[in-house]
Amino acid sequence: MSVQDTGGWHAAPDDLTAYRQGHLHGAVADSVEAHLLRCEQCRATLADTVPAAEQAARFERLAVAIDQPSRWSRRSTWLRLAAGTPELATAAISLAVAFVAAPLAAAALDPRPATAWFLALAPVLPVAGTVLAYRAVADPVGALAEATPLHSFRIVLMRVAVLLGALLPAGVLASLLMPGRAVHLLGWVLPALAGSALVLAIGTRRDPVWLATALCAAWAVTVAVGMDRRRLEPLGEALDGLVVNSLTVQATALAVALLAVAHLSRHRDELTYGSPA
Amino acid sequence: MSAAVVTQGLTRRFGRHIAVDELDLRIDGGGVVGLLGPNGSGKTTLLRMLATVLSPTEGRIEVFGLDPGRTDERTAIRRRLGYLPQDPTLYAGFTAFDVVDYVAVLKELTDRAVRHDEVRRTLAAVGLSDAMHKKVRTLSGGMRQRAALACALLGSPDLLILDEPASGLDPDQRLQLRSVLSAHGQTGTVLLSTHHTTEVAAFCQRVLVLLEGRIRFDGAPADLARLAEGHVWVDRSGTHDPTRSWVSADGTVRAIGSPPAGAELLAPTIDDGYLLLARGLTVAG
């Protein structure tokens, strides 16, 4: 290693320049680095050999590396807000997997009760997912966000879209794979959308948990009672004869969903959440 | 130039309970205004309404001359506002930097380099530079409170509304808070609620005392102390009434209210003035 004695050991300027440029290797590089760690004078000399523009660029790269401690920082603004907390993404994936795996596993054991349970409980997940988008678990900063310019209902809508985007395809896939005709097993889709839209609309004024619970309970009881009354019929006929699969119920669900969406769309800029109006 | 805050007949009810009752208030730009009041006096409700988070039941609010009831004007107000709620919750899995950066995104700081500079600035202002990359779950209560305060300071807002900002801070941190808020009060307006009369006396230019939803005092901290002039004395009666007297550090019993004849009067403090109002003790003269 080239060093010169100037009252103490100091690295030669040529070595410092070579170190900066990455041209020193092996033991010499290690030695210069070890010396720099304990010698302020050599650090200053090294700094002097770095052009100002290069220093600025290095600091900028360093700042970028330091300031991006998580993947969330790399997302665009709205995507980042829609993502909310990691728990929200975890919930969406977990519920979607459960939506497919649980009914299929149950159907492998006993198709009839599994199908009845599936139809009774299928709307619960989308509606529960919609409620989840309102909850504190979905928001990283809670009330701190409330007085910020971008705090708006749009964030909830985007989080609901993320959840439904995972849950609805999973539910449809499960319906197609379950025993029985798919057209009967897809009877939950429109009511689930209507329930989610209603929960979204009501959630701007009241805590949506009670509405969601009531809607899901009413649906589940109706399906359970209907299936029990038709327990002697073959599965396909029993599903076909259920009230929830009737044209009236499906058309009503569609109308409710459209009305709620129209209301939300019309008032989306006025709506807020997180506080009673 | 319009006032920072103007309210007229501002009222907020929760069912039958009236939290804020026909409140008229004007806060011109600049300075630090302290809001004192016991628990349940309506401080948080008032601050939430002024921060555009809660709508009033009746009455009018203007912030910078804008109406928070109108969507576009509410957004314009929020662009000039910093708000620290009572008991802010932060996601435990984020770092302090992530939390402040997330709020910075919500505050429309879209340029990443500018935003990160601002996040670092506010974290440094509250003394969290060394802890910015620690997860929230590992931070102490005081550090979390300071991280939340950093969020409110983002963008050097014209109006800073802080609900009990000193909560959970130790004496050193309180001194630092005073320094930060005093500096902010040089260029903007700071409105903060607190239970600590010493905070108000130390750095507020104006103090409001809110009792049962109404403002019962509006003036300088020294004037609040003067309110009790001639009404603070050494109680030697031996009967200690906890609603109007207490034992001070030197062992004497300090009493407020109407002094008996010949009582040894004491110099009033802002505490005395506040307690006199809060406890509804009549002041003669």
Image (cartoon, coloured by chain):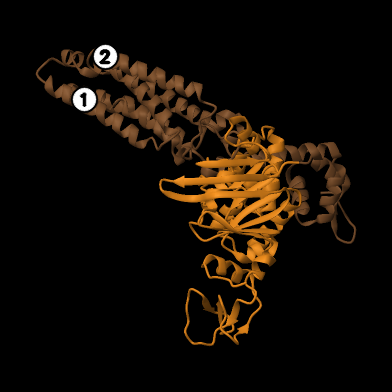
According to the picture, the residue beneath numbered tag 1 turns out to be A222
How many numbered marks have been drawn onto this rendered protein structure?
2
**Label 1 vs label 2: CA separation?**
14 Å
The three-letter code of the residue at mark 2 reads: Thr
Q: Quadrant of residue A127?
A: top left
Instruction: Of the two numbered discs 1 and 2 on the same chain, state the one appearing first in sequence.
Output: 1
Residue drawn at (40%, 24%), measured in percent from left and top? Answer: A197
Mark 2 packing: few (<14 Cα in 10 Å), some, or many (20+)? few
Under circle 2, the secondary element is helix
Which chain has been coloured orange in this picture? B
Q: Residues within 10 Å of mark 1 (few under 14, many from 20)?
A: some
Please, what is the three-letter code of the amino acid marked with disc 1?
A: Thr
Instruction: Name the image quarter holding residue B234.
Output: bottom right
Location of residue A100 in the rendering, given as x and y in whole percent from the top left corner: 32, 24
Q: Chain of mark 1?
A: A
In the image, residue A114 sits, relative to residue B165, either above or below, namely above
- Using the image as rendered, state which of residue B274 and residue A53 is in the foreground: B274
Q: Horizontal and vertical percent for residue B238?
A: 49, 87
Residue A239 sits above or below residue B149 on the image: above
Q: Nearer the viewer, mark 1 or mark 2?
A: 2
Marked residue chain, label 2: A
Name the colour assigned to chain A in the rendering: brown
Pointer 2 residue: A248
In this rendering, the answer to whether A235 lies above or below B253 is: above
Image quarter (top left, top right, bottom left or bottom right) of the N terminus of chain B: top right
In screen coordinates, is A239 left or right of A79?
A: left
Q: Residue furthest right?
A: A6
Residue B140 seen from this side: no
